[in-house]
Image (spheres, rainbow, N blue to C red):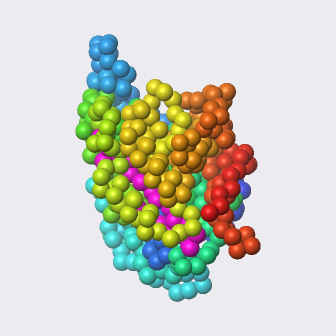
Amino acid sequence: MMQLTMIRVMSVGLFAMMLPSLEAVIADQGPYQATGLKIGEVDESSAIVWTRLTLRSNRNPSNGPEVRIEYDREKTEAKPRTLPVKGVYFPEGCSVSSLKEAVPGVDGDVRVLYRCDGGTWLETPWLRVDPLADFTRQFRLSNLRPASNYQVRVETRTVEEKPGTSLEGRFKTAPVSQLPSPVSFAVATCFGNDDQDTSEGFKLYEAISRLDPDFFVHAGDIVYYDQLAKTLELARYHWQRTYSWPTNVVFHRSITSYFIKDDHDTWLNDCWPTMQTPFMGDFTFRQGQAVFLEQVPMGMSTYRSFRWGKDLQIWLVEGRDFRSPLTMPDGPAKTIWGTEQKNWFKKTVMASDATFRVLISPTPIVGPDRPAKKDNHANAGYSHEGKELREFLAQQKMVVICGDRHWQYQSVDPSTGVREYSVGPGSDSHAGGWKQEDYFPDYHRFLRVSGGFLTVNVNRKSGVPEMILRFRNTDGNVKHEDLVLQ
C-alpha cells in the first residue's frame, strides 16, 4: 500500500490558518489537484463539485518560458484587435504544458465523498476525468439538507487504480424559501492575470474569506483571453494559471461560488456569437462557450436564479450567447439577453415572493458609462432594451449588481430610480477607465476608481427585512454602504 502523508496544500499565511479543517492527502505520485476544486450552483438540496486532475502538485514556475504571438502588421489600417494572427511561437522544445504557470492535466479517476457536519459519509462512484475537457469532472450532489454545512473530500486514483491525492472542502446549502434567514454574500469581477497584488495571487480572496459569506458570485471577466488565447489549448491555459494561484485554491475550497461569463472569458472584448475577426487565430467563440462550461461548476443553463430564504432571490444572467451584433442599428429587435432569456427573467421575477430580488449582471444596466462604449445596456448601442429592462426593474423594485467596469460606483437611474452597484476590479492595478473627478450628481451616490468587492447582508431588524450593500477595498475595509428597505 502506498504510504500517505497528511500535509497542508498551498498554505497562504494566515489565510490558510483560517481553514484548519481543510487538509490534503498527498501521495508519493499523482494524480494531483493543483487547480483545486470549485463548489457551485448550490441551492436548498443540491450542489455541483468541480475538480481537475493534474500531473504535478504545483503549477509551473512563474519565471518559465512564454508563448509569443505575432500579427500581420502589414494590415496597417486595421484596429489592434482585428489584426490577423501571423504565428504562435513557443520556445524550442516547449508546448502549452511547458509555459510559465501552466498546470498540465493527467488521466485518472475521481470521486467525491460528502457529509453534513457530524453525519455519515456518502460517496459518488469513481468516474474517469475527460481528457477532451482538460481532464475535468463535475459531480452533482443531490438530496442535501437545507441550511446545512457540508464537508466534501475529492479523492483521486490512477488509471491503474493506485490512490492519488485527496482534497477537502466545505460549503453551505441555501435555507428554505418559507423561512426568514440571515444571508450574506460577496461579488467580485475583472481579475487580470498580470495584476495580482500578492506573490500568491489576489488578497481580495483572503479579505472575503475573513467575512465568511454564505456564497460568492464571480460577475465575469474571470480570465482575459484576448492577447494569448489563439488556440483551444491556450484558452485552457488561462484557467490553469488563474486557478492554481494559492489564494484562489484555498478560497474555493471553503466558499461556494456562482460564475457568470462575460466577453473576455467567452472570446474577446465586446464579442457576440456571429462576430468575425482573425485576431483570435484558431480559437472560436463556440470553443469559448464550451471551455467556460468545462472550467466552472455549471448546470444546464448559464442564466439561472437561486433562492436563499424568504428574503433573498438572485438572478444571474447570460450576456454573450444571445446578443445581437454590436454593429446592428438599435431598435426593438436588437438585444443582449435574447427573447427567451428575457421572457424567463420577467416571468420568474414576477412569480417570486422574495423580499429582496437582486439582478447580478456581467455588464451595467444603469451606468453611467464612457460615451465611447456601445456594448452594454447603459450605452447607446443597446439603449432600447436597456430602457425596457430599467422600467421593468423599477416596477418590480429590484436592484442591480454589475461587473465589467473597472471602477466602483453606486448610481441611481434618474428616470426610473433603479439602483446599480458596480463592484469594481479584483485589484487596484486593474482599476481604470474612469476618472475620480468625473462624478455625475444626476447618477452617482458613490464613486471610487480602485479595486475591491461588494458585500451584501440580508437580515431582519426588529422584524423588518433590510439589505445592506457595502463597497470594500481589496483589504476588506468598508468605503461606502447603502441600506435598502422594502
Residue 393 is one of the magenta-drawn residues: no
- Viewer-closest of 382 and 239: 382
Looking at the image, is 144 positioned above or below residue 280? below
Residue at 27% from the left image edge and 46% from the top image edge = 286
Q: Which residues are magenta?
A: 304-324
Give the x, y percent position of residue 198.
64, 42
Give the x, y percent position of residue 166.
50, 68
Give the x, y percent position of residue 37.
48, 61
- Viewer-closest of 447 and 51: 447
Residue at 33% from the left image edge and 71% from the top image edge = 127
Residue at 69% from the left image edge and 70% from the top image edge = 464
Left/right placement of residue 134 relative to residue 377 reads left
- Viewer-closest of 350 and 282: 350
Looking at the image, is 27 positioned above or below residue 284? below
Q: Is residue 241 visible?
A: no
Give the x, y percent position of residue 80.
37, 22
Q: Is residue 332 visible?
A: yes
Q: Quadrant of the C terminus?
A: bottom right
Instruction: Using the rendered view, name the quadrant where residue 158 is placed.
Output: bottom left
Left/right placement of residue 458 relative to residue 461 reads left
Residue 307 is one of the magenta-drawn residues: yes
Left/right placement of residue 252 relative to residue 73 reads right
- Viewer-closest of 403 and 1: 403
Instruction: Using the rendered view, name the quadrant where residue 277 is placed.
Output: top left
